[in-house]
Structure formats: C-alpha cells, structure tokens
C-alpha cells in the first residue's frame, strides 16, 4: 500500500515538473503571426498581439497586449486596447502537433472607444465586413474557422462613447464586464453585459444578437433586456444639463432591433424627478412607462406613449423626436384629462409649479393639452390649462390683497376656493406667460387678464376683478361694494360693471395683490367724479379716500 502511494506521489510530482518545464520547450511567440493574421482577416481591422507566453495550468496563451485598430474616418485612436489577452487553446494539438485551436478569448482591462457619426455610422460598423469568408488564409491552418469562438469575455473594461461632431461630453462606462457565448458571424449568440455609471449607477443587459450584419455591424439584429439601477441621466451623459430634466431612476426595459428600427417598452421608477427647467424635485417617486420606435440610421423616433403616473392617474405624451443634431429636438403632445389634483401634488414641483409658502391644492381636477416643441436647449411648451373645483389650502387671499381688504374686511380664511381657472400658457426659458386668464373665486368674484412668471419666480400680472358674477356677489364682494358706495356714490355699480384693475407682483412664494388706482379712476372717472374730478380738483377728498382704501398713493 505504501509503495502504491509513493508511486502515485511520484507520478503527480513528475506531472507537475512536466507542466512547469513545458513552456521552456514551447516558444509561444511562434503562434503570434498566425493569431494576428487570422484576427486581422476576420475582423477587417489591423490586430496586434503582444508577447505570448504559455500557461499550461489555465490551458491558455497569454498576450501582454492587444490592440484592434479603429476606423480612420472617425478617429486615429484604436477601437480597443487591452492590457492582457488570455487565449484559451486546446493543449494537446498545441504541444504535440504545434496546431493552434482557439476556444476562448478573455480581455483584461480593455479601453474601448466608440464613435457615432451624424449619418448613423459607428466606428465599428465595418468591423467583420466579409470576415466569415476571410478567416482561412491560403497555406495556413485556421485558428478559428469562420471565427467561431466558444467564449469571449471582457473583464473590468472601460468604454467611452461619443459622437462626431461632438455633442456634449462623452458617455463613460466603467467596470465594463461582458460575456459572449458561442460567437459566430453566421448565427445568433447569447450575451450578457454589465457596467458602472457615474453617480454610483449600474446597468446590465442580457439577450442575444446576430447573425452579424457584415455590411454594418451596428445594425445587427438583437433582443435585449435592460436593467439600470440608480441611473442619473445627466451625470451619465444621456441628458444635457441645460435641458432641465433630471432624476434618479431604476429602469426595466425590453428592446428588439431588426437592424433598421429599434422598438422598446419599459418602466422607469423615478425619484427626485424634475421635468422642466426651473422645477424642483418631486417629493415622491413617480412612475413612467414608455413605448417607442426608434429609427437607427437617422437617429429619430416616435413616442407611441409615455405615461407619467402619479397616484392612480397618468398624463400621456406622444409624438416624435430627433437626436441627430446638436441637441435633441422634440415635437410632442401631452394630454391630461380631468386628473385628480390630489394625485398630482407630487408632480407639481417637477414642472416648476410653485405655490405660495405653506399652501397646497386640495380636491378638484386638472385638464390640459400641451405641445412641447423645439430642442432641449430652447423648448416651448404651450396650450390651454383648466383647473376646476379646487381649494388652495394654507393661503389667505384677503391678507395678500394690500389695501383692498379694507374695502369690505375681506377675509377668506386659510383656504381660497377656486371654482374655475382657465388660461393659455406658454413656457420658455425666458418666462412662463399666462394669457386669457379667467378665474371664478366664489368668495370674491371673476378675475381675468394675463401676465408672466420670471425664471426666479417674480410675478408680473395685470388682472381685472369683477365683484359681481353670474352666480351673484360673494360675501367679500358685498363688503367691498358697500364700502366703495359709501365713499364714492355710484362707484359701486360702475366697479361691478367694469371691474377693479389689479396688479399681482411679488413672487410665487409670496404674492402681493394691489388695486391699480390710476386705472380704476380712469375707467370710472365719469361715474365717480361726475366728469370733473381730474380737471378742477373739487373732489380731492374723494380721491384721497379711494386711494387710501386701496392702499395706494395718487
């Protein structure tokens, strides 16, 4: 028994010695010209392999460098440079017949440089063009007939993706890991890919691709499932910071490409969502689901549906976009029909709606149809907006009506009711403009006019307040008319008919509402002053009384 054990140990020791000394008798660099020639022919690009060494334990040849040339039409930089390349080979034919039969490739720490031209071509589009018929060189054995390789692996790589001409900063993917099984030019092959994104994001892709389109590798058909975690589209380079769109998102998407168009459906769980420049992050997560069809060559697409969900309701977006220019160009339409405002509260900050400090909207509905046109750098959002039967809780309208409150002791309490509010809005980088405003406030009356909100929130509105409405005069309106009648006789009926000019200034957080006494006197001079006040000054006390009540000097 002991003799057998000794013999077994001796055999093992002998095998170890043989494995250790075999590389001394095999010059691995003899295979380097064959590898370079076969790879260059297969890929259609100049391939350079560094010094080779033999690793019997791993069954591989190890190159200390790999370089695959890029397309000179795009950039002089190589398409791929790797620190190390492990080439899995069949050891028996290599050692005893000096035949190289490749089973796998493993690239360690490669730098990959991808460039897209304005016409849709990539610097890898011509990769492998005609390669399936070029892997066999006359008079030489083929290391991989028709470039069929069992496994191709990338470990801890880095990819830089950019466009020419350049549009913004390149997109960078760190910690890139990929695996391709049973790669072939002639048939589909499964693959997996994962990479890190800026701001601690991560993306994984799994699916199948092929057969390789040898006229344009970039249009190879594929099916893929894409998952992204903690995606910051601005930090990742997907969205221009100037566009105003930002979020932290988890994405689950499915994509299918036939080489001409790419169809994708998916869901996005977005936190801290901002949809418009000047908006602030939504306080609660927002769910988005989408369905798009993208044309690869001209980099344009159709948004079949983009649903922005808050609570149990959703606003829907459809239209077209173009990514080929310096900045993405949109021609979209947003439709929201009678959406409960309570469920929309989380979205209001993200679209730049800032309510007065401490106030919230409660109840009611919102209806709108908005067009979104132009590039992300100079977009225009326009269309009608209607709000019905809502309450602005935490906002005392009377306390904001400087001077005017004295006319009837206007007190709306800490809630302002809005029966109807209609306006046409136009949102640009310069300002938000609201025209054709009509509002019915049961406690006060009817309001009409227009104005602007500056990017910093400054208000500049000229409005007209009619105290009498088709539904009667509110309690505050009765007090105001009574006070006005006591001061100027016929002013009550005239103000009820013509309205009181009102300016709204201050900010969205702290609005200031004041009567425009100058306009009031001009509009109602004949009734209030008998047509003589402005000319001879006989009723100066009346003027002083009116201006005092409205909180304005002459």
Image (cartoon, helix red, strand yellow):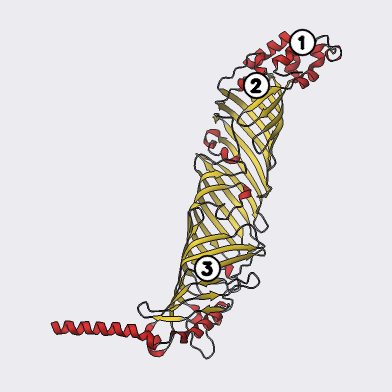
Q: Which residue is mark 3?
A: 111
Q: CA distance from mark 2 to mark 1?
A: 21 Å
Tags 2 and 3 touching, CB below 8 Å: no
How crowded pointer 3 is (Cα within 10 Å; few <14, some 14-19, many 20+) is rated as: many
Based on the displayed image, in which of its 4 quarters is residue 357 positioned? top right
- Of tags 2 and 3, the one toward the viewer is 3
Answer above or below: position of 456 versus 524. Answer: below
Residue at far bottom of view: 139
Q: CA distance from mark 3 to mark 1?
A: 83 Å
How crowded pointer 1 is (Cα within 10 Å; few <14, some 14-19, many 20+) is rated as: some
Q: Earlier in the sequence, mark 2 or mark 3?
A: 3
Q: Mark 1: which secondary structure?
A: helix
User: Where is residue 390 shown, x and y percent of the image?
Assistant: 57, 28
Q: Mark 2: which secondary structure?
A: strand
Q: Which residue is mark 1?
A: 542
User: Where is residue 200 shown, x and y percent of the image?
Assistant: 48, 54
Q: Which residue is mark 2?
A: 401
In screen coordinates, is 464 left or right of 122? right
How crowded pointer 2 is (Cα within 10 Å; few <14, some 14-19, many 20+) is rated as: many
Q: Nearer the viewer, residue 490 or 241?
A: 241
Q: Residue at x 46, y 85 (%)?
A: 29
Answer above or below: position of 11 versus 209. Answer: below
Please indicate, yes or no, whether residue 420 appears anywhere in the rendered image.
yes
Based on the displayed image, in which of its 4 quarters is residue 297 positioned? bottom right
Q: Mark 3: which secondary structure?
A: strand
């Amino acid at each position: 028994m002991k003799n057998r054990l000794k013999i077994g140990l001796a055999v093992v020791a002998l095998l170890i010695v043989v494995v250790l000394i075999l590389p001394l008798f095999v010059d691995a660099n003899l295979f380097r010209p064959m590898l370079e020639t076969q790879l260059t022919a297969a890929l259609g690009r100049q391939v350079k392999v560094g010094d080779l060494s033999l690793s019997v334990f791993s069954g591989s040849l190890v190159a200390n460098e790999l370089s695959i040339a890029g397309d000179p039409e795009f950039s002089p930089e190589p398409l791929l440079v790797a620190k190390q390349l492990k080439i899995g080979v069949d050891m028996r034919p290599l050692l005893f017949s000096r035949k190289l039969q490749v089973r796998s490739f493993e690239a360690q720490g490669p730098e990959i440089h991808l460039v897209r031209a304005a016409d849709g071509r990539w610097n890898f589009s011509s990769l492998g063009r005609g390669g399936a018929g070029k892997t066999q060189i006359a008079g030489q054995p083929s290391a991989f007939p028709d470039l069929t390789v069992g496994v191709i692996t990338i470990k801890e790589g880095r990819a830089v993706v950019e466009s020419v001409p350049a549009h913004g900063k390149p997109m960078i993917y760190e910690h890139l890991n990929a695996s391709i099984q049973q790669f072939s030019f002639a048939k589909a092959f499964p693959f997996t890919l994962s990479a890190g994104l800026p701001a601690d994001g991560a993306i994984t892709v799994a699916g199948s691709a092929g057969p390789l389109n040898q006229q344009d590798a970039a249009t190879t058909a594929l099916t893929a499932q894409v998952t992204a975690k903690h995606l910051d589209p601005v930090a990742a380079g997907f969205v221009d910071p100037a566009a105003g769109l930002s979020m932290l998102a988890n994405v689950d998407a499915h994509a299918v490409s036939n080489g001409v168009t790419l169809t994708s459906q998916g869901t996005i769980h977005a936190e801290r969502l901002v949809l418009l420049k000047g908006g602030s992050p939504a306080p609660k997560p927002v769910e988005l689901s989408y369905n798009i069809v993208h044309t690869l060559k001209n980099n344009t697409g159709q948004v079949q549906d983009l649903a922005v969900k808050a609570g149990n309701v959703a606003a829907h977006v459809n239209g077209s976009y173009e990514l080929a220019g310096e900045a993405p160009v949109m021609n979209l339409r947003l439709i929201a029909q009678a959406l409960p405002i309570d469920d929309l509260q989380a979205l209001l900050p993200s679209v730049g709606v800032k309510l007065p400090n401490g106030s919230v909207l409660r109840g009611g509905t919102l209806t709108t149809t908005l067009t979104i046109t132009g590039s992300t750098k100079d977009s225009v959002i326009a269309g009608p907006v209607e709000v019905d039967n809502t309450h602005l809780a935490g906002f005392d309208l009377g306390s904001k009506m400087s001077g005017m409150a004295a006319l009837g002791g206007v007190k709306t309490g800490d809630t302002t009711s809005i029966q109807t509010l209609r306006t046409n809005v136009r949102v640009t980088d310069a300002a938000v403009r609201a025209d054709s405003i009509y509002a019915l406030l049961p406690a006060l009356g009817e309001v009409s006019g227009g104005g602007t909100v500056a990017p910093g929130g400054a208000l500049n509105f000229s409005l007209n307040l009619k105290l009498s409405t088709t539904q009667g005069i509110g309690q505050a309106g009765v007090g105001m008319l009574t006070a006005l009648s006591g001061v100027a006789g016929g002013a009550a009926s005239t103000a009820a008919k013509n309205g009181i000019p009102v300016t709204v200034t201050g900010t969205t957080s702290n609005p200031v509402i004041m009567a425009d006494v100058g306009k009031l006197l001009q509009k109602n001079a004949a009734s209030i002053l008998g047509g003589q006040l402005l000319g001879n000054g006989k009723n100066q006390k009346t003027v002083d009384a009116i201006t005092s009540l409205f909180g304005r000097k002459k």
